[in-house]
Amino acid sequence: MINSVAGFRVFIATEPVDFRKGMDGLAGYVANTFSLDPYSGAVFVFRSRRADRLKLIVWDGTGLILLTKRLSRKSFVWPKAQGDPLVISKIQFDALLEGIEWRQVVPPRTHKPTFL
């Protein structure tokens, strides 16, 4: 389980990255391409060209974590390529990691209770 230090912010790089990059290369990519701080505690997700593998990096407060996942029979569902990273919710992130259609997942709505 990944617990982000800065709440739970997830950024998806919509364009494929060179999967030879390790954690330092991906952290540099985040800083140089998106002008974001890879050590902020946010989760940054990247995909391979075939979309059957993904890598993510996150700073947990003590070190940088690199996680890799490969699906055995299908591809990850990925948004269309755009310049900026896409921000998704925790529930959508969980669905993405499972390899299911995360764009159809709607975060639960929260509301304040009303008092009579």
Image: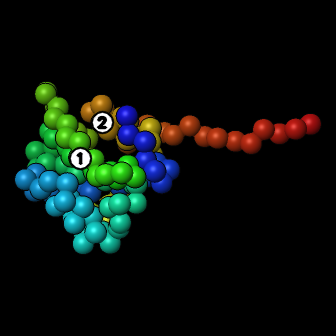
**What is the quadrant of residue 99 in the picture?**
top left
**What is the quadrant of residue 90 in the picture?**
top left
Between disc 1 and disc 2, the foreground one is 1
Q: Which mark is residue 66?
A: 1
User: Where 22 falls versus 54 (above or below)?
Assistant: below
Q: How many marks?
A: 2
How far apart are the two marked residues, 1 and 2, measured between alpha carbons?
Answer: 14 Å
**Going 40% across and 52% down the picture, which residue do you hit?**
61
Quadrant of the drawing holding the C terminus: top right
Whether residue 81 sits left or right of residue 4 in the image: it is left
Q: Looking at the picture, tell me which residue is in the foreground, 56 or 102.
A: 56
Q: Looking at the picture, tell me which residue is in the foreground, 16 or 31.
A: 31
- At label 1, the amino acid type is Leu
Q: Which mark is residue 35?
A: none
Whether residue 72 sits left or right of residue 83 in the image: it is left
Observer able to see residue 75: no
Residue at the front extreme of this rendering: 62
User: Where 8 falls versus 72 (above or below)?
Assistant: below
Q: Which residue is mark 2?
A: 97
**Going 40% across and 60% down the picture, which residue do you hit?**
40
Is the Cβ of the residue at disc 1 closer than 8 Å to that at disc 2?
no
